[in-house]
Image (cartoon, grey):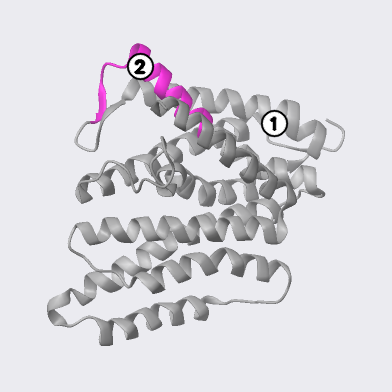
Amino acid sequence: MSELAKRVVVALIIAPIAVAAAWVGDAALATLLSVVGAVAAWELCRMVRAVGVAPIDELAIGIAAVLPLVAHGVRLSVLNPSAAWFAVCMLVIMTVVIFRRGVNAQPFGSAAATLLVAFYTGGTLSFAYGLRYDNYAIGRASQCLVLLLPVLLTWSSDTGAYFVGRLFGRTKLMPSVSPAKTIEGALGGVALSVVMCWLFVRHLLVPHAQLGLSPVGMLLFGVSIAVAAQLGDLFESLLKREAGVKDSSGLLPGHGGFLDRVDSLMFVLPVAALLLDQLLIPAPHA
């Protein structure tokens, strides 16, 4: 089977699962985010070890898996975490480092890497749960559409950057990190993201969710999501280049690893949550 065929088959399996979890929400969405966060954390731990730093794998993976479930618990009013929760979490990691890492085993790097892995993966992915519930959207269809908006724009940015870069790309964006990316491609990704944002809001969000964005809001949101998506991709490329690996793992044939599939979303989801909280407006009769 060719690499393209593998990509298509895997995408046809994964995409319906992701959309179904977004539609059902609640425990289904939290569980999917938990699993993806844990696997991505495991992949990232392997990459960090390749550069000579040893994170506490069990803690990094465990925290990454728990964070989306905490978001679900907050919505159910079962949990009410405060800043002290996260401070204690950091202190637990430091305490484990005391007993698991000696002076010559890079204790500082170990603690820092464990925190980065956990919150970069499970922490950022948890914002997908908040996007579905922490806004004006009422009802399953409306909530699902709000969550899918930044996901679609992330895909649009990636698609636009790829095709515009292939056709018109001349000026390298950051060759030391990702030699194939060009400035023209990046601008193409931004442009397609803005267009898709307008189409999604006008033809899906307004009529089916009674929510919308102002013209300035659509421009700002489309540009911001595209920039965040491309930065997320560049950041993971930077990590992989330092680790000397092509993919985060081989778990997804034709796609690499889970981290390779969600690297852009890890930057996009928190940005989307912040912006939609400010930009999303009711549009009951639009």
Where does the magenta region start and end? 154-174
Q: Which residue is mark 2?
A: 166
Residue type at the position of mark 1: Val
**Pointer 1 local density, CA inside 10 Å: few below 14, some 14–19, many at least 20:** many
Element assignment for label 1: helix
Mark 1 lies on residue: 201
Q: Residues within 10 Å of mark 2 (few under 14, many from 20)?
A: some
Q: Position of residue 5 (x, y in %)?
A: 46, 26
SS under mark 2: helix
Q: Quadrant of the C terminus?
A: top right
Distance Cα–Cα, label 2 vs label 1: 29 Å
Give above or below for 221 relative to 138.
Answer: above
Question: Residue at the location (63% across, 38% down)?
Answer: 149
> Where, by quadrant of the figure, is residue 212 drawn?
top right
Q: Residue at x 21, y 65 (%)?
A: 53
Q: Position of residue 128 (x, y in %)?
A: 59, 52
Taking the image as shown, residue 72 lies to the left or right of residue 86, namely right
The prevailing secondary structure element of the residues shown in magenta is helix
* The N terminus, quarter of image: top left
Residue 102 placement (x, y as % from top left): 18, 83
